[in-house]
Image (spheres, helix red, strand yellow):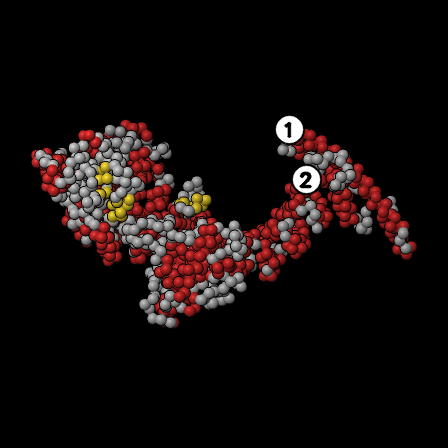
C-alpha cells in the first residue's frame, strides 16, 4: 500500500482507476482497526507466517492483471510504508519483480518488468534523450515529464504517447494479420471475385490511422520494404474491385457499389500516404501502381461525381444506358473497357427501369449523399497526389495525366472542393517539373476559352483570410503556378562584391525570378495572338480577358498574391506592343486602351489611398511605436509586429556578409525605414498560421508568397536607380540583407515534430493589406504610371474614332481616381483638342469626362465651363444632351453655382432645338427647378419674416432674371420690349410646363409623383397654383425692369437720348 498526503492508501496495481493525474488522490476503503491483524504485531517479517499457497495465488493474480489502458508509470516509494506492509513485504521478498511495472505497453506479456529509476537516473535518461534528438533525423516523441497530482505525496510520470518502437511493432502485427487474412482468402476459403475476400472498411480505417501516424512521425521508412510492397499489392487488389463500377441514382451509402468504391478510395489514400512518406526505398515506387491510382481517381471523378453535377458529362457517359441501348457498369464507347463482372452486371441492372424512365436528358437534381462522400474522398486523394509530386520524381506520362485531370476539373461547376485541390496538384507539378510548364500553360489557355464569360458561379475560389472577395479558379491556378515557379537562391557561397551581384542578376528561365516574367509574357502573348481565331470561333475574348484583369486587380494588394503585380505589368507590356495598341485591328487597339486605363486607374487610386492612410508607418518603422504614446488608432498587434520587425531588420544588417549598402533607407523625406516595413510583411507571410504543417514530418516548406516576395525585393535592389527606377529609393536592403532576413525568420519556425507555436508579432489582415499597398508603390508597376498615362493620351490621336473614344474613357477612369490629373498640362491640352474632334462619339466622351468633375471641383469648373457651354450647340445630339444634363446637375447639386444664371439662359434657348427629345428634356429641367413641390414646411403662403426668404419669391426673382437675360439676348436692339411673343423661349417653356400635352398631363394626373393617383392629381393642382403666383411675380418684375429702363433713359444726356427713345418706344 502507498500512503497519500491525507493519510489514505492507494494500491498501485489496481487497474480500475484509469491513467489520470488524480488517481493518486483517490481513497480506498479502509479496514477497521479491530480487524486489522497487523496493527499491534511486531514489524519483523518472521513474526507473521503467511500460507505459501496463498502468496502464490496472489502473485499469479497480480501478474495476470491487464494494465494496457494505463498511460502513466507510477514510481513507488523506495522504503515500505509504516503500516499495512506485511503482506506486501512477504510478496516482494518472494517475488522480487511483482510490483515493478510500467503501463506504456499493451500488456505484461509484451512489456517485461523494468527496475524503477531513481531521480538521478531519470534526469540522466532525459538528458540522453534530448542529446539523441539533436543528432537523430527523427525526433523522439515519447518523453516522460514528472507531474505531481494535487494533494498527492508522490510524483507521476505522464507519457506523451507510445514510443517509436511500439508504433512499428503494432503496425507489424496489424500488417501480419492483414496479410494472413488475404493469404487465407487467396487459398480459397472465401469466394473468388467477392469484395469480402480482401479488407473491410473498419480494417482499412484502422490501417490508415496507423500508416498516417507512422508517416507523420517519419517512421514509415523503418518498416521492412518487403512488407510495404506486399501491403501495396493488397491495396492495389482492393482498388481493382472498384474498376468500372458506377454509382446509380438509386444507390445509397450502404449499397454494394458505393461500398466497393469507398473501400477502393480508402486503399488509394493509404497507398498515397505510404508513397508520399519520407525516405522510402525505391522498390515501393512502381510506375504501374501509381498509374493505377491515377486511373482510379480519374474514372470515379468523371463517372461518379461529374455526371451528377454536369449535364454534358451525364449525356456522354450515361446517355446511351439511360436510353436503354447499353448495360453494365462501363461506357459503351470506351475502347479500354474490360469485361463486366457478373456481380456488377446484376447490381447495375437492378435499377435499369429507373434509369430508362429518366430519359437521355440530364436532369439537375440534388446530388446524392453517396456522391458527396466520394467527392470528399477524391478531394483528399488529389491533395495526396500533390504531395507525391513533391516527394518523388514521377514519369512524364504520369505527370501529364495528372495535370490534365486537374485542369479538366475547371470546366465542371459545383465541385468547388475538387477544383481547389486540383489547383494544388497542378501547382505542385508546375513547380517541380519545369519541363512540363509550357504544356500546363497551353492547357490552361485552351480551358480558358471554353469557360463561360459570365454566370452565377463565375468566381468560386474563396480566400481563407478574406471572405469578401473571390476570383475564378482558373485565375487562381495560373497565378499560383507562376508564383510557385519563382525561387530565391542563396548566393552566400558565390564570389563576393560585384561578381556576386552579376551572378545573382543573370536571367534564368527555370530558377530565380525569371520564370515569373517568362510565363506571364507567354500567357498574355498567346492569348492576344488568338484574337482572330477567337472571333472565328465566336468566343468573347474581351469578356474572358476582362474577368482575368478583374481578378488580378482584386488580388493586387493582397499579401498572399504578390504575383498579381508582375502579371499586370506583363499584361501592360503586351498591350503596348504589336499585340495591343500597335495592332492593325482597331477593335484590338480599343480593347487594349480599355485594359490599360483600368490598370492605370487602379494604380492612381492606390496612390490616393496611401496618401490618406492614417497608419503612422514612419514612426513604426523607426521606433516600433506610435508617434503619440497611448495612441489608440494603432492596434497593439501592429506595434508588436513593428517591434519584432525592428529586431529582425537589425539582425539582418549586422550579420557577417551583409552589405553595408543595406543601411537605413529613408523615403521621400518621411524617414521611413523600408527594410523594417518589408520585414513586417515578410514575417506576416512566413507565419505558419495559415500554412499546413508538412504531412510527412518534414520541416515546413516556405510559402510561395514569401519566396516570391524575397526574390522580387532582391531583384529590385539590384536594379535600384536604373531607368524608370531613378529618383526612387526602392527596397530597403540588398540581396545579402534579404538572405539574412530569411535566415532570421526561419529560426522562428517550430522544430519538425515539435509543438506548433504561434508566431509573435503578426499583423491583422486589414493592416497587412494596407502595408502591402504601401510597399507596392515602390514596385515597377506603380513607378510606370506616367508611362501608361502618356500612352493613353497618345491614343487620343488614333485614326479610328472608336479608338479615340476608348482612349477618352480610359483617361476618364484615371481622372475619376484622382481629379487632380486634369490639372496636368499634357492632359489639359489633350482634352481641349478633343473638344473639337470630328467624331461625335469622341466629343460626347470628353463632355462626359469633364461633366463628372465640374460640380465637385471649382477649379475644374473655372477651367472648362466655357468650353462645355460652347458644346451646347454642337451638331451631335448626344453631345448637346450631355451638356444639358451636366448643366442640370450643376444647378441641382450646387444652389450657389457661380454660373447659375448663364447656365439657365443656355438651357432656355435649347427649347428652340430641332430635336424633340432635347425640347422635352429642357421642359423637364425647368419644371424640376421652378415648378416642383416645395419642401416640407415651405408653404406657398410663407413670407420672408423668418430666417429665410419666401421660396416662391426666390424662384420668381430667379425666373425674371433669366427671362430678362433671354429677352435682352433676342432683342435686335439689345433692349427688352413688351408684350412678349409666343415664340419667346421662356414663354414657350412656361406654356409647355403649365399646359402639358395630353400624354404628359395624363402622366402627371396618374401619379408621376411618388404618392401616385390622388397624390399625383394634387401635385398637378399645386403646380398650377404655383405657376399663377410665379406669373404674377414675373409680370411685376418685368414691369419694374421696364420702368427702371425708362427712368435710366430719361436721365441720359440729350446727345445720345434720341435713338434710345426710339428703340424703347411702344
Q: Is residue 318 left or right of residue 552?
A: left
Q: Quadrant of the N terminus?
A: top left
**Image height of 542 relative to 415, above or below:** below
Percent x, y of residue 672 = 49, 61
Observer-nearest of 696 and 319: 696
Instruction: Please report the residue visible at 25 percent of the width from the left and 48 percent of the height from the top.
Output: 144
**Image height of 714 relative to 605, above or below:** below
| Res 243 seen here | no
Q: Is residue 433 left or right of residue 478?
A: left
Q: Label 1 belongs to which residue?
A: 1013
Percent x, y of residue 815 = 57, 54
State the SS at label 2. Answer: helix
* Label 1 Cα crowd, 10 Å radius (few <14 / some 14-19 / many 20+): some
Instruction: Please report the residue visible at 23 percent of the width from the left and 47 percent of the height from the top.
Output: 214
Percent x, y of residue 623 = 48, 59
User: Disc 1 to disc 2, how far (Cα)?
Assistant: 19 Å
Observer-nearest of 216 and 424: 216
* Label 2 Cα crowd, 10 Å radius (few <14 / some 14-19 / many 20+): few
Q: Label 2 belongs to which residue?
A: 928
Residue 123: mark: none
| Res 819 seen here | yes
Q: Is residue 298 left or right of residue 526?
A: left
Instruction: Please report the residue visible at 64 percent of the width from the left and 33 percent of the height from the top.
Output: 1009
Q: Quadrant of the C terminus?
A: top right
Instruction: Please report the residue visible at 70 percent of the width from the left and 43 percent of the height from the top.
Output: 911
**Image height of 920 relative to 353, above or below:** below
Percent x, y of residue 824 = 59, 60
**Res 979 quadrant in image:** top right
Amino acid at each position: 500500500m502507498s500512503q497519500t498526503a491525507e493519510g489514505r492508501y492507494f494500491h498501485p496495481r489496481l487497474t480500475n482507476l484509469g491513467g489520470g493525474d488524480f488517481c493518486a488522490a483517490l481513497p480506498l476503503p479502509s479496514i477497521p482497526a479491530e480487524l486489522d491483524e497487523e496493527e499491534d504485531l511486531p514489524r519483523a517479517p518472521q513474526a507473521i507466517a503467511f500460507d505459501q499457497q496463498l502468496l502464490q495465488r496472489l502473485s499469479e493474480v497480480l501478474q495476470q492483471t491487464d494494465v494496457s489502458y494505463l498511460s502513466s508509470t507510477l514510481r513507488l516509494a523506495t522504503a515500505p510504508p509504516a503500516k499495512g506492509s506485511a503482506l506486501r513485504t512477504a510478496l516482494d521478498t518472494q517475488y522480487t519483480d511483482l510490483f515493478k511495472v510500467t503501463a506504456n505497453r499493451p500488456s505484461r506479456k509484451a512489456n517485461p518488468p523494468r527496475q524503477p529509476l531513481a531521480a538521478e537516473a531519470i534526469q540522466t535518461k532525459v538528458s540522453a534523450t534530448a542529446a539523441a534528438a539533436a543528432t537523430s533525423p527523427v525526433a523522439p516523441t515519447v518523453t516522460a515529464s514528472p507531474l505531481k497530482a494535487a494533494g498527492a505525496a508522490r510524483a507521476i510520470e505522464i507519457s506523451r504517447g507510445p514510443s517509436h518502437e511500439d508504433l512499428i511493432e503494432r503496425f507489424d502485427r496489424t500488417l501480419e494479420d492483414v496479410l494472413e487474412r488475404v493469404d487465407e482468402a487467396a487459398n480459397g476459403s472465401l469466394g473468388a471475385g467477392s469484395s469480402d475476400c480482401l479488407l473491410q472498411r473498419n480494417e482499412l480505417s484502422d490501417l490508415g490511422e496507423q500508416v498516417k501516424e507512422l508517416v507523420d512521425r517519419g517512421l514509415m521508412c523503418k518498416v521492412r520494404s518487403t512488407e510495404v510492397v506486399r501491403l501495396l499489392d493488397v491495396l492495389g487488389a482492393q482498388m481493382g474491385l472498384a474498376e468500372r463500377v458506377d454509382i446509380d441514382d438509386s444507390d445509397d451509402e450502404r449499397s454494394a457499389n458505393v461500398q466497393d468504391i469507398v473501400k477502393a478510395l480508402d486503399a488509394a489514400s493509404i497507398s498515397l500516404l505510404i508513397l508520399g512518406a519520407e525516405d522510402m526505398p525505391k522498390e515501393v515506387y512502381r510506375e504501374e501502381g501509381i498509374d493505377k491510382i491515377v486511373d482510379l481517381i480519374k474514372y470515379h471523378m468523371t463517372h461518379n461525381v461529374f455526371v451528377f453535377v454536369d449535364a454534358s458529362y451525364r449525356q456522354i457517359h450515361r446517355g446511351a444506358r439511360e436510353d436503354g441501348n447499353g448495360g453494365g457498369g462501363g461506357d459503351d464507347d470506351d475502347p479500354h473497357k474490360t469485361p463486366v463482372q457478373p456481380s456488377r452486371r446484376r447490381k447495375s441492372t437492378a435499377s435499369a427501369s429507373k434509369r430508362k424512365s429518366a430519359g437521355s436528358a440530364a436532369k439537375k437534381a440534388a446530388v446524392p449523399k453517396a456522391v458527396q462522400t466520394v467527392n470528399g474522398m477524391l478531394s483528399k486523394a488529389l491533395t495526396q497526389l500533390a504531395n507525391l509530386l513533391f516527394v518523388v520524381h514521377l514519369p512524364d506520362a504520369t505527370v501529364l495525366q495528372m495535370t490534365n485531370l486537374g485542369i479538366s476539373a475547371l470546366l465542371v461547376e459545383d465541385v468547388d472542393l475538387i477544383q481547389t485541390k486540383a489547383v494544388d496538384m497542378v501547382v505542385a507539378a508546375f513547380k517541380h517539373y519545369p519541363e512540363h510548364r509550357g504544356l500546363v500553360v497551353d492547357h490552361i489557355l485552351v480551358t480558358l476559352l471554353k469557360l463561360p464569360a459570365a454566370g452565377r458561379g463565375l468566381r468560386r475560389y474563396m480566400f481563407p483570410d478574406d471572405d469578401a472577395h473571390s476570383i475564378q479558379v482558373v485565375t487562381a491556378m495560373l497565378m499560383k503556378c507562376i508564383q510557385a515557379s519563382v525561387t530565391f537562391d542563396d548566393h552566400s557561397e558565390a564570389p563576393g562584391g560585384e561578381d556576386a551581384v552579376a551572378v545573382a542578376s543573370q536571367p534564368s528561365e527555370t530558377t530565380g525570378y525569371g520564370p515569373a516574367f517568362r510565363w506571364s509574357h507567354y500567357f498574355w502573348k498567346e492569348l492576344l495572338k488568338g484574337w482572330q481565331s477567337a472571333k472565328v470561333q465566336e468566343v468573347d475574348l474581351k469578356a474572358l480577358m476582362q474577368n482575368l484583369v478583374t481578378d488580378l486587380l482584386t488580388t493586387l494588394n493582397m499579401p498572399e498574391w504578390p504575383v498579381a503585380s508582375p502579371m499586370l505589368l506583363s499584361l501592360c507590356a503586351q498591350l503596348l506592343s504589336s499585340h495591343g495598341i500597335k495592332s492593325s485591328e482597331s477593335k484590338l487597339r480599343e480593347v487594349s486602351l480599355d485594359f490599360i486605363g483600368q490598370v492605370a486607374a487602379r494604380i492612381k487610386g492606390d496612390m490616393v489611398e496611401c496618401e490618406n492612410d492614417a497608419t503612422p508607418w514612419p514612426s513604426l518603422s523607426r521606433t516600433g511605436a506610435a508617434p503619440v504614446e497611448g495612441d489608440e488608432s494603432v492596434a497593439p498587434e501592429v506595434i508588436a509586429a513593428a517591434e519584432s520587425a525592428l529586431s529582425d531588420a537589425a539582425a539582418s544588417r549586422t550579420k557577417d556578409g551583409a552589405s553595408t549598402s543595406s543601411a537605413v533607407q529613408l523615403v521621400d523625406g518621411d524617414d521611413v525605414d523600408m527594410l523594417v516595413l518589408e520585414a513586417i510583411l515578410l514575417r506576416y507571410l512566413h507565419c505558419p498560421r495559415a500554412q499546413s504543417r508538412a504531412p510527412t514530418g518534414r520541416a515546413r516548406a516556405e510559402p510561395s508568397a514569401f519566396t516570391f516576395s524575397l526574390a522580387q525585393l532582391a531583384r529590385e535592389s539590384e536594379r535600384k536607380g536604373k531607368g524608370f527606377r531613378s529618383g526612387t529609393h526602392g527596397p530597403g536592403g540588398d540581396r545579402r540583407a534579404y538572405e539574412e532576413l530569411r535566415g532570421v525568420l526561419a529560426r522562428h519556425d517550430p522544430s519538425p515534430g515539435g509543438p506548433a507555436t504561434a508566431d509573435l508579432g503578426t499583423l491583422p489582415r486589414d493592416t497587412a493589406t494596407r502595408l502591402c499597398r504601401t510597399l507596392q508603390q515602390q514596385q515597377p508597376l506603380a513607378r510606370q504610371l506616367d508611362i501608361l498615362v502618356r500612352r493613353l493620351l497618345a491614343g487620343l490621336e488614333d485614326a479610328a474614332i472608336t479608338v479615340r473614344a476608348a482612349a477618352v474613357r480610359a483617361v476618364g477612369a484615371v481622372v475619376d481616381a484622382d481629379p487632380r490629373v486634369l490639372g496636368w498640362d499634357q492632359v489639359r491640352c489633350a482634352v481641349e483638342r478633343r473638344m473639337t474632334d470630328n467624331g461625335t462619339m469622341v466629343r460626347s466622351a470628353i463632355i462626359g469626362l469633364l461633366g463628372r468633375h465640374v460640380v465637385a471641383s471649382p477649379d475644374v469648373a473655372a477651367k472648362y465651363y466655357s468650353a462645355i457651354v460652347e458644346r451646347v450647340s454642337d451638331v451631335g445630339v448626344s453631345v448637346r444632351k450631355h451638356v444639358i444634363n451636366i448643366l442640370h446637375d450643376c444647378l441641382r447639386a450646387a444652389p450657389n453655382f457661380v454660373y447659375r444664371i448663364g447656365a439657365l439662359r443656355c438651357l432656355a434657348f435649347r427649347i428652340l432645338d430641332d430635336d424633340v427629345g432635347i425640347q422635352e428634356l429642357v421642359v423637364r429641367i425647368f419644371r424640376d427647378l421652378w415648378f416642383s413641390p416645395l419642401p416640407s414646411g415651405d408653404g406657398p403662403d410663407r413670407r420672408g419674416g423668418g430666417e429665410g426668404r419666401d421660396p416662391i419669391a426666390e424662384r420668381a426673382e430667379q425666373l425674371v432674371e433669366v427671362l430678362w437675360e433671354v429677352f435682352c439676348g433676342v432683342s435686335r436692339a439689345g433692349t427688352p420690349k413688351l408684350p412678349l411673343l409666343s415664340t419667346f423661349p421662356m414663354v414657350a417653356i412656361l406654356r409647355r410646363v403649365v399646359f402639358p400635352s395630353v400624354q404628359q398631363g395624363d402622366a402627371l394626373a396618374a401619379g408621376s409623383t411618388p404618392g401616385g393617383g390622388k397624390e399625383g392629381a394634387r401635385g398637378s393642382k399645386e403646380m398650377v397654383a404655383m405657376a399663377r403666383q410665379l406669373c404674377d411675380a414675373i409680370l411685376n418684375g418685368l414691369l419694374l425692369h421696364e420702368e427702371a429702363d425708362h427712368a435710366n433713359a430719361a436721365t441720359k444726356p440729350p446727345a445720345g437720348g434720341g435713338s434710345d427713345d426710339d428703340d424703347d418706344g411702344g
